[in-house]
Amino acid sequence: MQLGFSVDEVLSTTRSVRKRLDISKPVPRAVIEECLALAVQAPNGGNRNSWRWIIVDDPEKIALIGAQYKAVFASGESRAHQPIPASVQRTDRVMESVQALIDKIERMPALLIPLMPGRAEGKSAMEQAVMWGSIVPAVWSFFLALRARGLGSAWTTVSLAREREIAEILDIPFEQYTQAGLFPIAYTIGTDFKPGWRAPLAEVLSYNGFAGK
Ligand SMILES: Cc1cc2nc3c(=O)[nH]c(=O)nc-3n(C[C@H](O)[C@H](O)[C@H](O)COP(=O)(O)O)c2cc1C
């Protein structure tokens, strides 16, 4: 069921939901499939449709994958991520929210793991752009479709530090497919999300060149 948001409302209020993911409410496969059917309308290189979409709703597998996600943080590997500049606002709240997902990821109703064909290692920038550009628009459309229906997710990438282990849990042929991330799926606790903080356009936009006004 859709909540009746306008397109602009959905675009401006689809947050990375972590604290407010409701792990007590099951998510029917039909709802996930409805969102995925919309998601795959996103563009993909050559319209090859060579993506694969894995939904994990077996609680045992979710627990195993969630444990891998947790382990990346416990080992400190997640700190290899780029440092956050001091100008970014509310980083303490982001960290609290990141922790909330770590705490409950093993008990999510479902997870999405999208697969891109091939391996990104050693590819040129152009080849990598085709790989990522053929999956990211669809995953974001999935987020928007979830939001329109009162569900949410959070974009996560740290699971790729355990990509091989997760591939084993799900029988993914590692040499043939690259995981694009790990996306929890749950109903949200309340639906009153607000636009997030972003660097003002004036700081990041230029015209007709890198420094143009
Ligand atoms: C490429 C990318 C990687 C991210 N990786 C993680 C992650 O591994 N774990 C996590 O909890 N959040 C992750 N996030 C979520 C961001 O922290 C979040 O989008 C940001 O704090 C802004 O929040 P908002 O989108 O709700 O405004 C990631 C987001 C993106 C786009």
Image (cartoon, rainbow, N blue to C red):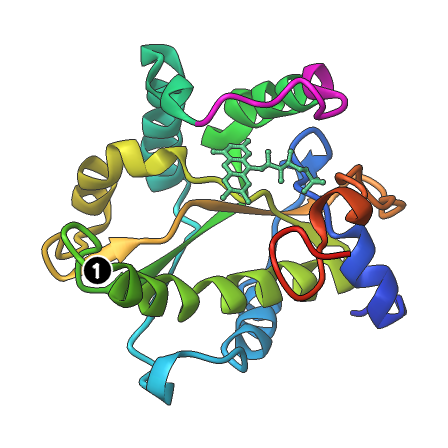
Residue 203 placement (x, y as % from top left): 75, 42
The quadrant of the rendered image in which ligand 1 is seen is top right
Q: Viewer-proximal residue, 63 or 179?
A: 179
Q: Is residue 95 above or below residue 129?
A: above
Left or right position of 146 against 195: left
Q: Which residue is drawn at 62% across and 36% down?
A: 23
Q: Which residue is drawn at 79% across and 49% down?
A: 201
Magenta residue check for 56: no
Image quarter of residue 101: top right
Can you identify the residue that label 1 sits on? 124
The secondary structure making up most of the magenta span is: loop
**SS category of the residue bearing label 1:** loop
The amino acid beneath tag 1 is: Ser
Magenta residue check for 91: yes
- Indicate the quadrant containing the C terminus: top left, top right, bottom left or bottom right: bottom right
What span is colored magenta in the figure?
Answer: 82-93
Q: Viewer-proximal residue, 57 or 69?
A: 69
